[in-house]
Image (spheres, helix red, strand yellow):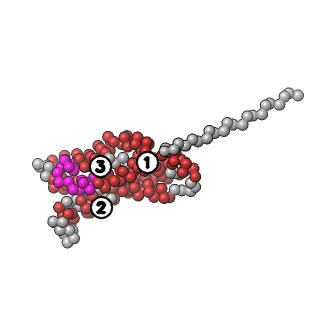
Amino acid sequence: MGESPPPTPPPPAAPAKVYYEGCPGCAMERRKESSTGTPYKELFFVGITTFASSLPITSLFPFLYFMIQDLHVAQREEDIGFYAGFLGASYMVGRGFASIFWGMVADRIGRKPVIVFSLFTVIVFNTLFGLSVKYWMAITTRLLLGALNGFLAPIKAYSIEVCRDDEQALGISIVNTAWGLGLIIGPAIGGYLAQPAKQYPHIFHDKSTFGRYSFLLSLISSY
């Protein structure tokens, strides 16, 4: 009789995970392992902040033509589209230059600080944009709004990190849904509340704040 084959050695144990103090990603992984069920609270935060951040992107398009008129930068009516194009594109120019930087910052210090800072810059620079009385001020505030708003990449990463592996698609879908809703509702708010002294003279006086700054109300209402 032949000898029996040697027993199969057990598979090697998976190496234990190592967490480091002060590491935002380690803290998130540790929290996700200890949680059960769908993180509704975190996903609600993701949806609300994404919606609030997407509103200012398109809220200016309904009144952009009239804003260029009020800034008196175009010598002819045919030139309004030229200046409006630069002003509308300045937000994405700023975001294009700064997005990689904000992604690196979010990896270093965590997602939430970058998200909170981005929401703060939206409030500050969107208000300053509504208070613009010169073309250079409008395009500068809009450019800084895009450059200092490093929101989209960290919120997508956060929506994945708070979900278990089988729910990560849900997190991304909430980001995309809230973003799309903001891009739809933003222009509606911008058009409905622009130039309130002309549209609603029985409510807003020409000498009031919203009468002197015709587009401030629609901009601050977008957040």
Q: CA distance from mark 1 to mark 2?
A: 26 Å
Badge 2 vs badge 3, beta-carbon distance below 8 Å? no
Q: CA distance from mark 2 to mark 3?
A: 16 Å
What amino acid is labelled 1 in the image? Arg
Q: CA distance from mark 1 to mark 3?
A: 19 Å
Q: Nearer the viewer, residue 69 or 140?
A: 140
Q: Main secondary structure of the magenta part?
A: helix
Select label 1 or label 3 by which is in front: 1
Q: Secondary structure at mark 1?
A: helix
Q: Tell me the residue that label 3 is attached to.
A: 145
Q: Residue furthest front?
A: 21
Q: Residue furthest bottom?
A: 202
What amino acid is labelled 3 in the image? Leu
Say which residue appears at 36% left-offset and 42% top-offset.
Answer: 99
Q: Position of residue 213 (x, y in %)?
A: 19, 60
Closer to the chain start, of discs 1 and 3, is: 1
Q: Secondary structure at mark 3?
A: helix
Side (left or right) of 84 relative to 163? left
User: Would you say residue 120 sits in the magenta stretch?
Assistant: no
Which of the numbered marks, if any, corresponds to residue 111? 1
What amino acid is labelled 2 in the image? Ser
Specify the quadrant of the image occupied by residue 106.
top left
Q: Read off the magenta span.
A: 125-139
Q: Secondary structure at mark 2?
A: loop
Q: Residue furthest right?
A: 1
Say which residue appears at 37% left-offset and 43% top-offset.
Answer: 102
Q: Label 3: how many residues lie within 10 Å, few (<14), some (14-19) or many (20+)?
A: many
